[in-house]
Amino acid sequence: MLKIHDGRPENIADRLEKEVRTYDLLDALGIKYQRVDHDAAMTMEACREIDEALQTTVCKNLFLCNRQETQFYLLMMPGEKKFKTKDISAQLGVARLSFADEKYLEEFLDITPGSVSVMGLMNDHENRVQLVIDEDLLQGEEIGCHPCINTSSIKVKLSDLLEKILPQMGHVPIMVCLPWEAPTEPSACSEVTYDTCSCTCGVTHVSENVENAENTGKTGLDKNVIVDNDRQDSKGDKRHQEHLPHSYEELLELITALRGPEGCEWDKAQTHETLKKCLTDETEEVIQAIDHKDDENLCEELGDVLLQVVLHAEIARERGAFEMKDVIQMLCDKLIRRHPHVFGDVPKPTSPEEALELWRMVKQKEKERKGQKG
């Protein structure tokens, strides 16, 4: 059973300097806080025990950056919300964000992986990191975090964080309102992916103001239901609603509608040339998702690449050049032709290298037949 303590540890001899600096800051500001010591909190299961001890609710701390690694953000959001790069990027008006490299986490915030905390901003003397807070966290009266190390957690008043701690640190937060999505499980800790798979994630805790939620009559689930019920395409086609099962044929219909007379002005204005940068950007984001081992984001980004393919095919169809079925036909023919060891009578290669060499030989013969040697 975890024990709650008031204030700093009596013996700080075995505490890291950055942890002691956290207590020094709070004491200097005259802020009262509670503390609990525990084993390194590396999983959401471990955070549940801390959650119960502090009487708080788990939320996420995510250390993010833009593609160029020139802008850095510390995002604090409820643990039960799903993190989607498009949502936060759109509200901040920056290129698609992804998890920042841990070297920046240590350089700017003096925090190691697994210990991401708003308190690390006291070490960001050059304001390299912008704090971003989801507005739903403001419903709480108290907030908890690690004192720059994930073997302890502290709880302070939310008002003290916003009115005393952050001003002392010289950081002004940006408030965002990230959308809710119904969780797959009723647990507030269901999003394990973002708290365990990334080296730049951390966990903090928020005390919920239940009375406020009851008075307003609006909870996260309420917001999610409202959004889902209102989502319908302009023609009232009930098939085209978010979260309903979709098909390849519907995807083609959606793209045709977007570029049709009653469609989207941006989509209608696109050409093969204007979409070149979009294709490059989406491909880079697929690579980022792979590098971060982020399956959910990878799924989303692969869809964005597919969107580019279908858009190009639709533009070509409008020009009378070719359409999506021709793209698929050509691709299938190529796969069959370049794998004669699978779909023909050529002996099977014994290694990936031999298989690749066979592919190259078939490709070279194709070029020669087309008069494109080299």
Image (cartoon, rainbow, N blue to C red):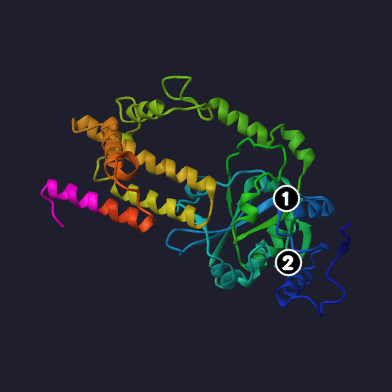
Label 2's element? loop
Counting every numbered tag in the picture gives 2
Residue sticking out furthest to the bottom: 13
x, y (%) of residue 64?
Answer: 54, 58
Residue 200 % position (x, y) = 59, 61
289 or 168: nearer the viewer = 289
Q: Is residue 226 above or below residue 3?
A: above
Residue 266 in view, yes or no: no
Asked if residue 356 is among those painted magenta in the image, a careful observer would answer no
Q: What's the mark number on residue 58?
A: 1
> Who is closer to the viewer here, 356 or 206?
356
Q: Which residues are magenta?
A: 361-374
The residue at 16%/57% (across/down) is: 374
* Left or right, residue 54 beside residue 64: right
Where is residue 181? Give x, y as percent: 60, 37
Does the magenta portion include 363? yes
In the image, what residue type sits under mark 2?
Pro
Quadrant in which the N terminus is drawn: bottom right
Q: Is residue 339 above or below residue 216?
A: below
Q: Secondary structure at mark 1?
A: strand
Q: Quadrant of residue 351?
A: bottom left
Residue under numbered circle 2: 147
